[in-house]
Amino acid sequence: MGAGSQVASFCLRIGEVISAAIVAGILGYYLHLLDDANAHANGRIIYAQVIAGISILAALIFMPPLKYSFWAWPLDFALFICWIVAFGLLVDLTSSGGCNSRWYWSSWGYYWGHWYRVVPITSANRALIGTANCATWRTSNAFIFISAFLFLGSGLCGLYVCTRDRHVHKEEVVRPEVR
């Protein structure tokens, strides 16, 4: 376990915590707005929020560049897959319409823009809501994607360290000579 892999692991873990915290903050605020409006949350948003929480916990536990943190590479690959699934689920909500999709203006834009306080959901439309809060939606999706690849990097770093150390230990074993 060299100094380079320890530094890389620590930097990747810091990035994982930061990106997962950004996702958790944005989606958490959206869930707060839904709760304020007595509306129901989409299961896809809940899934992404749960993955963000698990990722923060895992990254904090494995942040010290000790030997046990490198052996967590299967968990890193599992979280990579979970983040990619979360990205796909959230991007699929808006389909190809992006911030002009029906889901965006009837859910994200409606609640994020506090329209629920003045306009009933049955009167909301695309022209009224617009795409004013599209940046927050895109930011959450971007950091979901970034977090996925940070976990992939951690998994590859851990796999490299674990397989390299295995070969090093094999060379250190002294075999008795047969006479």
Image: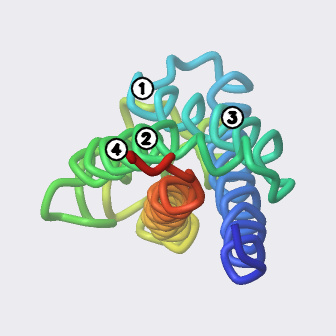
**Which amino acid, by three-letter code, is at mark 1?**
Asn
Q: Distance between the residues labelled 2 and 4?
A: 26 Å
Q: Position of residue 147 (x, y in %)?
A: 53, 61
Q: Mark 3 points at which residue?
A: 53
Q: Where is residue 109 in the image (x, y as percent from the top left)?
A: 49, 54
Q: Find the residue positioned furthest to the right.
A: 64
In the displayed structure image, the side of residue 132 where residue 4 appears, left or right = right
Q: Which of marks 4 and 3 is in front?
A: 4
10 Å neighbourhood of mark 2: few (<14), some, or many (≥20)?
Answer: many
Instruction: Please report contact status of discs 4 and 3: CB closer than 8 Å, yes or no.
Output: no
Q: Residue 107 carries which label?
A: 2
Q: Name the residue under label 4.
A: 81
Q: Can residue 118 be seen in this view?
A: no
Instruction: Please report contact status of discs 1 and 2: CB closer than 8 Å, yes or no.
Output: yes
Q: Residue at x 42, y 26 (%)?
A: 42
**Which amino acid, by three-letter code, is at mark 2?**
Ser
Q: Residue at x 53, y 66 (%)?
A: 157
Which quarter of the rendering shows the N terminus?
bottom right
Q: Residue at x 71, y 46 (%)?
A: 69
